[in-house]
Image (tube, rainbow, N blue to C red):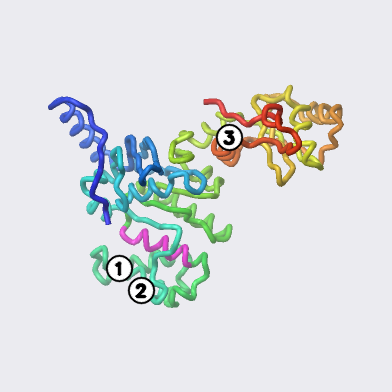
Amino acid sequence: MYESTVQHTTSGGGAPAASAGAADTLERARRGGVSAEGLAKRYGDLWALRDLDLDVPPGTILGLLGHNGAGKTTAIRILTTLSAPTEGRAWVAGREVAVDPAAIRRRIGVAAQEATVDGLLSGRANLEMVGRLHHLSKPDARRRADELLERLDLTDAADRLVKTFSGGMRRRIDLAASLVASPEVLFLDEPTTGLDPHSRNDLWDMLRDLVRDGTTIVLTTQYLEEADRLADDVVVLDHGRTVAHGTPDELKARIGNDRVDVTVGRADELTVAAEAVRAFATSKPSYDHDGLVVTVPVREGVRLMEIVRALDDAGIDAVDLNRRQATLDDVFLILTSPNQTAPDPTSADSNAANPQPEVQP
């Protein structure tokens, strides 16, 4: 149920501010897509979301990234009218969330992490039921169900009870249910969880087709490759706040494109290896303690042989060296794990001595 109390961000004063607000609302209604200004949500003394601004044009994909508890689900619940913001305003498919939630629900599709279809109905019956709930005629609901079953490679299982489906099949039938009404805006929460690589690629192709047809997609995912491949724009949340916003390429460029992964044989060699290659680094390294890997952002033009020599001079016999381009995984780890350090349990001053990961603002 939609919550009743909403605090809007407004300008003080009289008619001019009200007139400006009305003009802004009309512009957002005309444009469509998804937008938000200063969106925030508080539970008691805890702010689950603070000052979220979004601008997602129609026919684009927004990737919403963050660790568990970062505020992604809170943002999605507000945008899909399941929760009211404590502060700020949001518009979805040309309607303001706090003003016209019923109209928004008619224009959106939602695929949550957990399947919402009925396990005691067949796949076909589930989709036809959703179609009828959206006021499609019986023939139209049947045609739409058949179309989606074929598109998601579920035709052979269409008349089986959903409770007999595999996890990947249940994910696909749940996604199909969110597409029955051809929504203007589609919210996908971890859409490819449980899918094999072939099914994942097929789903990506289908989402690209939807976007080409004008659908706006807001996507949360733990597969950062998925955001890299699909998203036009990415917002990274951490502890309820936006810590980065931009295209995947912009975010990767922000932390430096070239990286060298140095795998060592022992944990006590991590900081020694980092110190050995510090002269080639553009910023401080990050560490994978379990994998015994130190990742160093390096200047363009640095040769791998120079790094090998520096490690050899420091007495480090590296197990492996790998030069690569930055990924969204690097962006995510650096922005949401700012306190990574190399372990040194014997030294009280290890945090001061060891390099810390950093990102340029």
> Residue 265, how many percent across, how many down?
81, 42
Residue type for callout 1: Ala
Q: Is residue 307 left or right of residue 149?
A: right
Tell me the residue at 44%/62% (across/down): 114
Mark 2 residue crowding within 10 angstroms, few (<14) / some (14–19) / many (20+): many
> Residue 153, how many percent across, how many down?
48, 66
Which image quadrant for residue 10? top left
Tell me the residue at 52%/45% (across/down): 229
Residues at marks 2 and 3 touching, judged by CB atoms closer than 8 Å: no
Q: Is residue 300 above or below residue 42?
A: above
Q: CA distance from mark 2 to mark 1?
A: 10 Å
On-image quarter of the N terminus = bottom left
Residue identifier under label 1 = 141
Viewer-closest of 334 and 132: 334
Residue identifier under label 2 = 125
Viewer-closest of 224 and 343: 343
Residue type for callout 3: Pro
Q: Is residue 336 above or below residue 148?
A: above
> Residue 304, how many percent across, how many down?
77, 30
Residue 160 shows which numbered tag?
Answer: none
Mark 3 residue crowding within 10 angstroms, few (<14) / some (14–19) / many (20+): few
- Secondary structure under badge 2? helix
- Front: mark 2 or 1: 2
Mark 1 residue crowding within 10 angstroms, few (<14) / some (14–19) / many (20+): many
Residue type for callout 2: Ala
Residue identifier under label 3 = 338
Residue at the front extreme of this rendering: 348
Q: CA distance from mark 3 to mark 1?
A: 50 Å
Extent of the magenta region: 170-181
- Secondary structure under badge 3? loop
Residues at marks 2 and 1 touching, judged by CB atoms closer than 8 Å: no
